[in-house]
Amino acid sequence: MSLSRREFMGAAVAAVAGAALAPGLRLIELARARSPEEAATRLQRWGLLVDIGKCHDCDVCVTACKTENGWYGHDRPATDPEWIRKVTLKDKQTGYVETLPVMCQHCEEPPCVDVCPTGASFKRADGIVLVDKHICIGCRYCMMACPYKARSFVSEDTTDQKSYAPRGKGTVESCTLCVHRVDAGRIPACVEACNKDGGKAMVFGDLKDPNSEINKHLAAGPSTPLRPDLELNTGVRYRGV
Ligand code: SF4
Ligand code: SF4
């Protein structure tokens, strides 16, 4: 789909989608990120490394994300939003069980962006994949296209929204890599919480900076994306899976 068609469709549905959002909440930071003077740059690519060997049987990352971004899925039915979830893997031959946190993998070639008919699903220059709530029509094509089940549909009334993470009934959402924090020079809430109360299993940083902490960790041992066969070059990598 050409950009001009996307822009046309986006303009046509913006009023409808915007009506589902709480008054006063605008995706100011996200809109700026797509403008010519955006802070996001191709000189950086933000990523996460999750070391499963250090990942405890806890949920501090999930709780931190929920608190930071104001979603409720962890305490409610599985159909409700869940930006990050702990997934249990079991080796059928040995019975060995491990758990790992799974969130949007911030794919370099995101299928969710490819299928979005309005352009609401987009990738910033620095690799962060987001949803513009003002032009999301809730068609859920992106949810079907995502191989990691990383996206959720908001079917409930939203309350206690954060100004930096607006949510909207009838739209789709997923991990933003805590873009509001990243743009302020901070690390994501899940990483901060894991470093404080978890197993120090998560490292955040710039995958394009050879001297970044994440690249030093990546150089120190093997790592893999989830489903490497899909060749999506995800920004989230795992060690020990
Ligand atoms: Fe899109 Fe899913 Fe990839 Fe995230 S993990 S960028 S939602 S396809
Ligand atoms: Fe949640 Fe932020 Fe971690 Fe993404 S980076 S899972 S939005 S806390």
Image: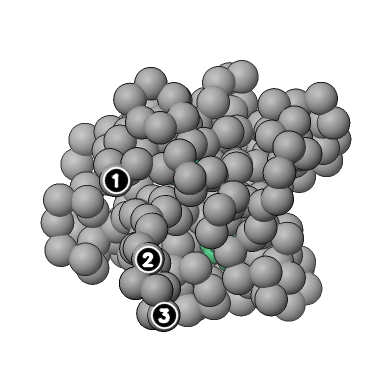
- Distance Cα–Cα, label 2 vs label 3: 8 Å
Q: Is residue 208 visible?
A: yes
What residue does disc 2 label?
A: 96
Quadrant of the rendering where the N terminus is positioned:
bottom right
Q: Inspect the image, locate mark 2, and give the three-letter code of the amino acid beneath it.
A: Tyr
The vertical placement of 197 against 94, above or below, is above
Q: Provide the secondary structure element on which disc 2 rests.
A: loop
Q: Which residue is mark 3?
A: 93
For this orientation, the residue located farthest to the front is: 94
How many angstroms separate mark 2 from mark 1 (CA)? 14 Å
Scheme of image coloration = one colour
Q: Which residue is mark 1?
A: 57
* Type of the residue with mark 3: Gln
218 left or right, relative to 76: right
- Picture coordinates of residue 171 (x, y %)? 38, 61
| Mark 3 CB lies closer than 8 A to ligand 1 | no
